[in-house]
Image (spheres, rainbow, N blue to C red):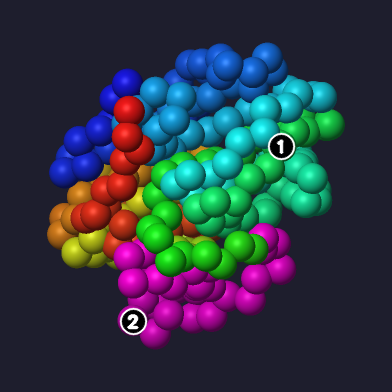
Amino acid sequence: MEINARFDEPVVVRTDQLDWTPSPMAGVDRRMLDRIGEEVARATSIVRYAEGSSFSEHTHSGGEEFIVLDGVFQDEHGDYPAGTYVRNPIGTHHVPRSGPGCTIFVKLWQFQDGDTEQFAVDLGSLETKPLPERPGVRSAVLAARDYEHVSIEDWQPGSEYTLADKGGIEILVLTGEIEHDGEALGRSDWLRWPAGKSLAVKAGQNGARLWIKRGHLSDLRVPAQ
């Protein structure tokens, strides 16, 4: 299966316009943003757990990172409420579930070997700092690696910048609204921009909180099929 698998092309997705696709487990559905592979895949998805649903135990053979958008995600390691960012490196495993139900943004098979740090962060408690090079924007770093840089950015209303990275850029709108090419993008909408290409973004009248990942699109890991 291939969905938005041309990483040299820009992608803009209004996620609420995508259909929910059932997963192999009852009560767990997905909106697929990009994907290379079948059930084991390099993938970026919005995943919805119905109340009381669970997924079978599995090992992260390519790593996993996710953000809890709504509800409470649970596994044997703990409960992760809305606003939690989690990184599970290659070789980690768990049994995901949700008693109250939840929605998560999740990326699979995108860790490199040697990236072994496992952690969970409450995004609501992060201290962001001003970016001198971009007035009106505050940032907090979630992960800084040779192959990627992951951060949270808070954009004040009307802030407008052109972004580019030699390894590409990916943006998830967490709250607020941004505008790109005349199109308004809101909560849970997603953009993926190719390596070296410029992306013009403007924050809406209420500002925006963005999850931004840079540098990771020039070296694509995919699972063997």
Left or right of 212 on screen, residue 72: right
Quarter of the rendering occupied by the C terminus: top left
Q: Position of residue 73 (x, y in %)?
A: 73, 41
- Horizontal and vertical percent position of residue 107: 47, 44
Q: Is residue 61 above or below residue 53?
A: below
Q: Judge by depth and name the residue closer to the eye, 195 or 129.
A: 195
What amino acid is found at the position of numbered circle 2 in the picture?
A: Glu
Mark 2 lies on residue: 133
Span shown in magenta: 120-149
Q: Nearer the viewer, residue 44 or 157?
A: 44
Q: Residue at x 68, y 53 (%)?
A: 83
Residue type of the residue flagged with mark 1: Val
Tell me, for residue 95, which label it has, or none. 1
- Residue sitting at 53 percent across and 73 percent down? 140
Task: Give me the residue at 49% from left, 68% from top.
Answer: 143
Whether residue 134 is in magenta: the answer is: yes
**Disc 1 versus disc 2: nearer the observer:** 1
Disc 1 secondary structure class = loop
Q: Quadrant of the N terminus?
A: top left
Label 1 vs 2, first from the N-terminus: 1
Residue 185 seen anywhere in this rendered image of the structure: no
Taking 62 as reference, is 121 above or below it?
A: below
Q: Report the Cα–Cα distance between label 1 and label 2.
A: 43 Å
**Does residue 75 show up magenta in the picture?**
no
Residue 166's x, y, as percent?
A: 19, 64
